[in-house]
Amino acid sequence: NDGSGPGGDGRDSIEIGALSIVDTAPVHLARSLGFFAEQGIDAKITTVQGGAYSSSGVVSGQFDFGFSNTTTLLTAREQGLPLKAVANGVASTGRAGPGKDYSAVLVPKGSAIKSAKDLPGHKIAVNQLKNIGDTTIRAAVRRAGGDPEKLEFTEIPLPDMPAALAAGRVDAIWTVEPFQTQAIDQGAHEVCWPFAEATDDLTVAMYFTSEKLLREKPDLVKRFTAAVNQALAHARTHPEAVREELGKYTKIPPAVIRRIVLPKWPTEINRPSVQAIADFARKDGVLSRPADVGALLP
Amino acid sequence: MSTARKGWDGAARKRPAGPLRRAGLRLLRVLGLPVLLILGWWAYSSAGLTFYLPTPGRVATAFAKVWFSARITEDVLPSVGRLLTGYALAGLLGIGLGVAIGSSRTLRAAAEPVLEFFRAVPPPVLVPLIMLLAGLDTAMKVLVIVSGCVWPVLLNTVEGVRAVDEVLDDTGRCFGLRGAARLRHLVLPAASPQIMAGLRQALSIGIILMVIGEMFASTSGLGHTVVLFQRGFAIPEMWSGIVVLGLLGFGLSVAFRAVERRILAWHLARGEERGRHA
Amino acid sequence: MLEITGLGKVYEGRGGVEALRKIDFRVADGDLVCVVGPSGCGKTTLLKCLAGLLTPTTGEVRVAGRRVTGPPPGMAVVFQEYGRSLFPWMTVRKNVELPLREKKVPAPRRRELVEEALSAVGLAGAAAAHPWQLSGGMQQRVAIARAIAYEPQVLLMDEPFAAVDAQTRAELEDLLLTLWQRLGVTTLLVTHDIDEAVYLGRRVIVLSSAPTVVQEDLPIDLPAARDQITTRSAPRFAELRAHVYAQIKQAKTGVPGGEAPAR
Amino acid sequence: MLEITGLGKVYEGRGGVEALRKIDFRVADGDLVCVVGPSGCGKTTLLKCLAGLLTPTTGEVRVAGRRVTGPPPGMAVVFQEYGRSLFPWMTVRKNVELPLREKKVPAPRRRELVEEALSAVGLAGAAAAHPWQLSGGMQQRVAIARAIAYEPQVLLMDEPFAAVDAQTRAELEDLLLTLWQRLGVTTLLVTHDIDEAVYLGRRVIVLSSAPTVVQEDLPIDLPAARDQITTRSAPRFAELRAHVYAQIKQAKTGVPGGEAPAR
Amino acid sequence: MSAPRAAGLGLLGLACLFAVAEAVPRLGLVDPRHLPPATAVLGRLATELGDATLWTALGETLRSWALGLAIACCLAVALGVLIDAVPGLRAATASTIEFLRPIPSVALIPLATLLFGAETGSTLLLVVYAAFWQVLIQVLYGVADVDPVARETARSYRLGRWAHLRHLVWPTALPYVLTGVRLAAAVAFILAVTAELVIGSPGLGLRIQLAQSGGAVTEVYALIVLTGLVGVTVNTAVRAVERRVLAWHPSVRGEAAR
Ligand SMILES: Nc1ncnc2c1ncn2[C@@H]1O[C@H](COP(=O)(O)OP(=O)(O)OP(=O)(O)O)[C@@H](O)[C@H]1O
Ligand SMILES: Nc1ncnc2c1ncn2[C@@H]1O[C@H](COP(=O)(O)OP(=O)(O)OP(=O)(O)O)[C@@H](O)[C@H]1O
Ligand SMILES: [Mg+2]
Ligand SMILES: [Mg+2]
């Protein structure tokens, strides 16, 4: 699907590969509120299972734009994938504390773990190893004065985390909304907020495209960015619209939607936080070279 | 599988003379097609400049770098251990259940829908359930392997047992062949060609499920490594992992064939002797 | 020993083939009965019902007073399809030995029985071969060896000598007679060879063609000790032979006729 | 038509079984030759070499002057293992028809041939059945029907009447003779039944036991027109019969003896 | 056994499964929030079935399933027969086949998306790749199982290459092939769902993926039950075909006799 050709009436149709999770609410809003249409774009959003698939889709030309977390994008860039960030995706609220951020480390009732410092020596579930979860946890632990070397990570898909925690298969889980709220409902509580604790105002994920598209259709990219930015701003100021949209494109039970903590959707990419993530990843061996953050960011 | 050189109608054709020539031909037969395929890959990948399909050269370099290391003992061996355990369990379960189901019409009618039900559930969606019941450790990964490997063995055993020659079965019944002896001397050998077909299928499915099992709740293992490479965009490394999977499959199948030659000796020899011809 | 009462069998395929209509006869303990009849009249079916391998549609079969619902113990069967009744994955020796193991015969005795049986049928040299490496007649002899090594109380044989040459056939016939006399095995033997039926049988049962009933139950009033030369050249033998031949001819054509042979 | 020169066959399994040592004989165009010999002496092996199904170890076989390297055209074979030579997935009619289709016989003629052949063997009613629904004798007759429907130039038969009753056997023998006379088929027939060999054959070839050679090649000097009653009761028939019997006996025991029967 | 009786027994088996699935969470062996009781799952399935989009999703999945399965079967049968028919081909291909077979389709996803950006193409590639081997191996074993006497018969009547295949090799291999088709049908369905799950092409897999990432546990299980039921249906259909085309085979004809 080269997709990006102008439609019959001079409009561009594009395909976006993105996960159907809370984080991507703005791009769905942009479509349903007509922000894309205003920019002369017909957008189709295709659900993928992970950021890696949206990257390969963008490289192969199946997608015109993708949504992926910062670590994945940095890794892709290091391996030579010609990707360019074009808009901010989602950011941490930057506030640590129960009910303050949309991602946290949770432990079961009665756990000895009280804060990031207590995590070393325990088995912690993340959805993907060598990705944003474990690097930010390490950073948070390091900041809190713990020994990140002693952390023990294991992979569990996000949906299965609450059950694994309840069954005592792991000591702690790192998860995001809506599973955070679900786990809390089942008796777990938050002890650490790695996104907020690792660095300030972390840019967790971004929208991106390929260098090819950027070169060939700079105007389309500009219009895409404009539409997304408009949506980000809208999402930030209209949480109710976001929750309503979530009811449409996800299967999160309505009762949960009402209570989940929403992330922050700034329009600007926080460059220092991306650099910080790159440095963490380098330190943890996820990246093998110091990253060229400038090559990725617009 | 028979390795005799046979014509379309099963008639053996003239064999080449000379041990040296024969060895050469054999080598050509084993390596010919793979070499051709690798050449094709080379041509395609060096022309196409595609990120996801690196040249064989790059894959070979990555292979040497990645796999001639501690990974062999840390990732590959434990994976293979789990694979073999799961495979063996699946084999026992498949043959055991298969014989029971194949021998009893009532049991077959009652059990088949349930089994078909489970068979149709994709392992990736079954994994969470297995995780729920069996935890995250080796047991879960072995169970995932069993959950996939058991089907070809089971189905083939059921069909093999159902197809036992009637005269042979009558003979066994008359001479009081019952229970374990009937199983050992009549049912299993009669069904063995089909059971072997199932076991062979299961071998490669086991490898696939080893990877799938290690995609979840894992920190090490061959499958996990391949998936990590894939997610980390280390494409030549990922391909080198796939090559390892292929080599593993090939190695296991060579071993399998050796065992099969022994078990099905009567079957193969019978086919061959009769087929020999002008 | 064997009692067959009102036995009928209808195969369900092909719109219902009535293989046997109504068969009644008894075989006394230690008797030797030969069954003859036109091709396809239901001899094999009768044998399989006796062996408990087929469920009769009507009537019943009793062996030693017990109603047959499955293969009764102590019975050996030689199948018409001898080739298919041998286990191709076993050597000849194993094939003969297997039922003995099942009978829990101790190993040394087993070996003895196997060797004896195989040499009795002239196959001592082929013990290590697989059945598919043997000629048709040899395969048939393996099946016979298996049955006699088993030392059954009841022996059912379906054309057991069809695939061997005349000379071997005569030898095997005499082997059967010797065994029968020595062990007192109740024997039912299906054959096409009228000479053989008269030579071996103490009684010959002639089956009609379909709808199959017992057309004649003929006692063979030849001297108990039989001999290939003298018995077969006895005038009474020729009479009985001719009579059975006429009966089968009649069974085939359906024309009634053929009185019991005059004494 | 058939020329067999120095034919030897060693089976490789079991440390090499010498089934045939050195066989030499010829069968003229349109001749009818019966082969007899002890069980396991190599008759089936000989037939398979003739049919191009087995490669001789030594010597060669020629059919119509051409060296046999594979089944020659215009040849039909009736196998000893008749049951397994029928395709279980086809009805009886289809089984008989299949070779004719391969021979590109047009459909109407094909139907005619199949019907004729099946009724000749008395199976017109079983055309729609599958082979495994038939009795042993019926299966064998299907195999015969398939061969005669094929209208071959050369007909090889391996104990084709072993599984049928005496009356049917006689009928099939006469059917074979009629066909042979009408079509002039060169026929080679393996049998155990010495009477049958003498009754049918223009020549009887007696094979020795292993190491197998042609022990005797006996011309049958009975009148060309044969008849179940008169031929079989002719004194010459009895002489020839006795002679062949003695030959086989000798072949089995290996003791030399038995001159050609005096004329 | 009569068809209604067999169906009754089958339903009985499913009922037992249902009872177990109901009892395990109800008895507290597993937290019902992670494994909901069967009634809840079936209730949810019932509501889902009332949703028209579910049927379109199912249709999408079944379409790529059927197409992929058909392609895989044809390719595998053709190749299997060819490998058997051409002397030496079996030996020449053996190493490659054994090497390629264990490569997980899932690992081919990047390649698939690369070659067939369009979604159905990718799904098809994965489905065909996975199902193909199942049938091929069965075909290879099946064609090697021809009865030697039957083969000699065919040869003596000089059956041509085609007739030999059609009348001898194919019927012999058919029971193996049907088992292969049953195996492949499940694998193809699994791959169709998995590909949708991973790549995100529309279909049942996508719905499962959405339900999973939304934490809607009951719905996940409802959809799993649906996939299972599809499997049962497919198997019933293949069994029916088998009863027709294998009526001559001991495995089927044995059921009628005795
Ligand atoms: N499995 C079957 N299904 C249907 N009909 C059958 C089956 N087996 C046998 N028959 C039919 O039953 C009848 C009797 O068969 P049976 O095998 O008992 O005959 P037989 O007397 O042994 O003949 P033969 O002397 O030729 O062996 C035949 O008409 C045959 O077609
Ligand atoms: N496939 C085989 N492998 C090894 N030996 C074989 C094979 N087939 C036959 N033989 C041996 O060859 C010899 C001749 O066998 P063949 O079948 O030709 O005998 P036959 O004359 O037809 O006997 P019968 O009258 O019993 O059918 C026998 O000793 C047999 O054991
Ligand atoms: Mg019979
Ligand atoms: Mg023979």
Image (cartoon, coloured by chain):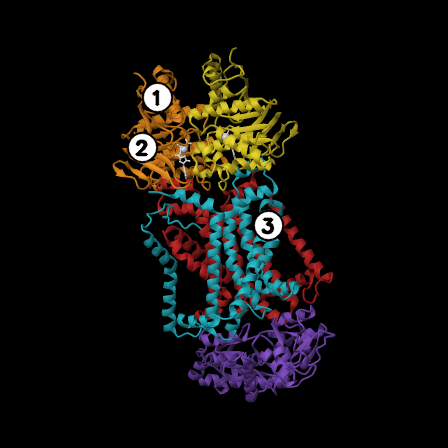
Chain colours: A purple, B cyan, C yellow, D orange, E red
Q: CA distance from mark 1 to mark 3?
A: 62 Å
From the top left corner, tell me how far across and down residue B195 is, in percent.
52, 50
Discs 2 and 1 lie in a common subunit: yes
Q: Which class describes the residues within 10 Å of circle 3: few (<14), some (14-19), or many (20+)?
A: some
Q: CA distance from mark 3 to mark 2?
A: 53 Å
Q: Chain of mark 2?
A: D
Q: Is ligand 2 within 8 Å of the beta carbon of the residue shown at mark 2?
A: no
Which residue is rendered at x = 68% and y = 60% of the image?
E38
Q: Mark 2 or mark 1: which is in front? A: 1
The disc label shown at residue D23, or none = 2
The disc label shown at residue D257, or none = 1
Q: Quadrant of the C terminus of chain B?
A: top left
Say which residue label 3 marks: B96
Amino acid identity at mark 1: Gly
From the top left corner, tell me how far across and down residue D130 is, in percent.
47, 38
From the top left corner, tell me how far across and down residue A262 is, in percent.
64, 81
Q: Give the residue at the far front of this rendering.
A: C108
Q: CA distance from mark 2 to mark 1?
A: 20 Å
Q: Chain of mark 3?
A: B
Amino acid identity at mark 2: Ile
Q: For the residue labelled by badge 1, is the local secondary structure a helix, a strand or a loop?
A: loop
Q: Chain of mark 1?
A: D
- Front-lying residue, D29 or A148: A148
Q: Which class describes the residues within 10 Å of circle 1: few (<14), some (14-19), or many (20+)?
A: few
Q: Give the residue at the far left of this rendering.
A: D65
